Amino acid sequence: MESNPMAAGATGYDAVAAGRDVLRCEAKALEALAETLGPGFEDAVERCFGLAGRVAVTGMGQSGHIARKIAATLASTGTPALFVHPGEASHGDLGMVGPGDAVLALSNSGETPELNDVIAYTRRFSIPLIAVTSKAESTLGASADVRLVLPAMAEAGTLALAPTTSTTMMLALGDALSVALLERRGFTADDFRVFHPGGQLGRQLLRVRDIMHQGAEIPLIALDPPMSDVLVAMASKRFGCIGVVDGEGRLAGMITDGDIRRHLGPDLLTMPVSAVMTCTPMTTTPGVLAAEVLAVLNARQIIAMFVIEEGRPVGLVHVHDILTAGIA
């Protein structure tokens, strides 16, 4: 059988080594970028935080692709943002940027001609301009109110021509700005879920209150009735459990299918509820993450928990409800 000259290693080329060189080059650049952050970065955060409007992120070519991602990350973490294509901006899209907004412009060289109209527009209407560039004295850098200067690092690869290291630094700087703003705003997991209702992220951030059974759906019975009434009530609700409440409506205990099996006998139907129930059942509260409750249910090998506020049951969360919601 003839050997394939294009097979891995046939030409002596080591793809893994080349890939590692690129990653190490970019990792080194990110370390250098981290060391450059200072007052300028803080100024950029405060300007974006104080906006009445949105952050318009712009860039051309590969910087434009990075700008789209930064705009999306900002928007998803509580900072209203949009991407503005610099070429389209010159033909009407500048109308998307107005008083109360700021512009975050990306250009490694700082001399991208398509950005000139955007720069001029921000200067004419006193719109804050934040520049991300490796050339502080470039047209973009010199015009900006805030300059976030990328350290001078070579692009990755033997030719060092394609935007690689520079765009990685831009992307990481956008992430840093987004997360710093998130923390500056006091953005919470609940806020995050508002912007991410779909997908696994949204499901993992569901709270007990979002999926619990409430009102008449909650299986409850008083301490007084005999077990015959308990069995009828449990069968009607079909949760495999029932909560026992005292005269003040507080949860006194819980009876499950397992409790009934353990007390099976000729006297079961006439036994008092207190003799069968578990007096200290596991409970939760409405604000707890449903994923946390699922972990407890699995660890304790139980199927449901009553949701308590001030000692009174306000809901019931069942393992099937959690799994149906897509949390696993």
Image: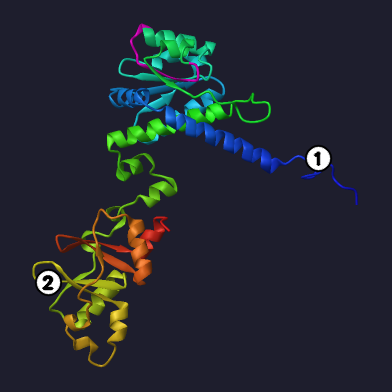
Q: Which mark is residue 171?
A: none
Q: Is residue 214 above or below residue 35?
A: below
Q: At label 2, which amino acid type do we have?
A: Asp
Q: Residue 95 at what x, y percent from top left?
A: 40, 14
- Please tell me the numbered disc located at residue 246: 2
Question: Residue under circle 1?
Answer: 11
Residue 116 as seen in the image, left or right of residue 220: right
Q: In which quadrant of the rendered view does residue 259 lie?
A: bottom left
Image coordinates of residue 208 in percent, x first then y, are: 29, 56
Task: Give residue 250's position: percent from left, percent from top.
Answer: 13, 67
State the SS at label 1.
loop
Horizontally, residue 201 falls left or right of residue 16, namely left
* 83 on left or right of 225: right
Q: Report if residue 123 is visible in the image.
A: yes
Tell me the kind of residue under disc 1: Thr
Q: Position of residue 183 (x, y in %)?
A: 31, 37
